[in-house]
Image (cartoon, rainbow, N blue to C red):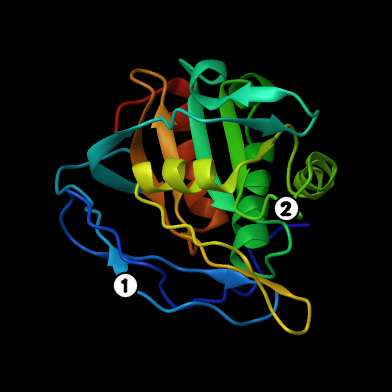
Amino acid sequence: MSHASRPRTRLPAVAALALALAGSLALTSCSSGGSSSNGGAATVRKESRSSAYQGSVLSKHFAKPDLVLTDTSGQPFDLRKQTAGRSVLLFFGYTSCPDVCPTTMGDIGVAMAKLTAEEQKKIDVVFVSTDPERDTPKVLRTWLDSMGTGFIGLTGDLAKVKTAALGVGVAVQDPVVNTDGTVTSAHGAQVLAFLPSDDKAHLLYLGDSSVATFAHDLPLLARGVAA
C-alpha cells in the first residue's frame, strides 16, 4: 500500500537550536495522544546553486553522530563505524507516533522499493528511537518491518540519543507519559542524508517530503552523487 496518500499532520515546532546555518525551517513534533510541545525553529538553508537533488541542500555538512546503541537483534551497533562509506538516511522518532514518524518511514519504504536490488544495498535507512523505554529491539523490528525492508533500528540511552541528535541539528525532548497513558515524544522530523564520500550530512528532508521526492533522490544517493 502506498503511503503517499496518507494525510500529513503539521504539528507545532519544538525547542529552538542555535546552528551556524542561514534561513529558517521549522521543526515539528509528534505524539501518541495528539498533544505536543511548543517551541522555536532550527535554521537551515537550501543553497542557491543548482542541485540534482530535490531535498534541501545543507550549508553546513554535519558529521555522522558518534553513537553506539542497541540494534533490533540486541547487538551493539556503532553508527559511525558500521555505516562508514555508505549513503545513509537518518531519522529520529518513536514507534507509537501516530503521524509524522510512520508517514515518513513509510514513504521512504515505498521509495526504497522502487530501487533496484543493487541500489537498495548501497543505502542504509537508520531509525533512532526517541522513546527507548518503550521501543525495545523487538518492538522496533516489528514496526520497521511494516515500513520497509532492511531498515536499521537503534534504541538505548536517551541522553546519548539527544546529544547525537543535537549534533546534527535535530531537537529531541524527553518523552512525557500523559494522564491517559499515551506518550508524547517531541522531536525534530527531519531526515538527514549522509553521502559516502565524506560520511557527512549534505541533504535534509522535512516531514512533508513526498514519496516522489524520495524516489527521485534515492537513486542519486545510491550512486553517491554530490549535492
Secondary structure of residue under mark 2: loop
- Residue ID for mark 1: 40
Crowding around mark 1 (Cα neighbors within 10 Å: few <14, some 14 to 19, many 20+) is some
Residue depicted at x 68% and y 65%: 97
Q: Report which quarter residue 26 is drawn in.
A: bottom left
Please state, as top left, top right, bottom left or bottom right, where the C terminus lies in the image. top left
Question: Could you tell me residue 122's position as x and y percent?
Answer: 57, 21
Residue depicted at x 62% and y 59%: 101
Left of 158 or right of it: where is 224? Answer: left
Rendered view: 172 above or below 35: above
Question: Could you tell me residue 222's position as x and y percent?
Answer: 50, 25
Q: Is residue 53 visible?
A: no
Question: Could you tell me residue 106's position as x and y percent?
Answer: 68, 53
Between circles 2 and 1, the one closer to the viewer is 2
Q: Is residue 124 visible?
A: yes
Residue type, label 2: Glu
User: 174 and 168: which one is in front?
Assistant: 174
Question: Could you tell me residue 187's position as x and y percent?
Answer: 50, 61
Crowding around mark 2 (Cα neighbors within 10 Å: few <14, some 14 to 19, many 20+) is few
Residue type, label 1: Gly
Residue depicted at x 44% and y 78%: 12
User: 59 and 20: which one is in front?
Assistant: 20
Rendered view: 84 above or below 182: above
Rendered view: 129 above or below 125: below
Which numbered tag is attached to residue 133?
Answer: 2
Q: CA distance from mark 2 to mark 1?
A: 27 Å
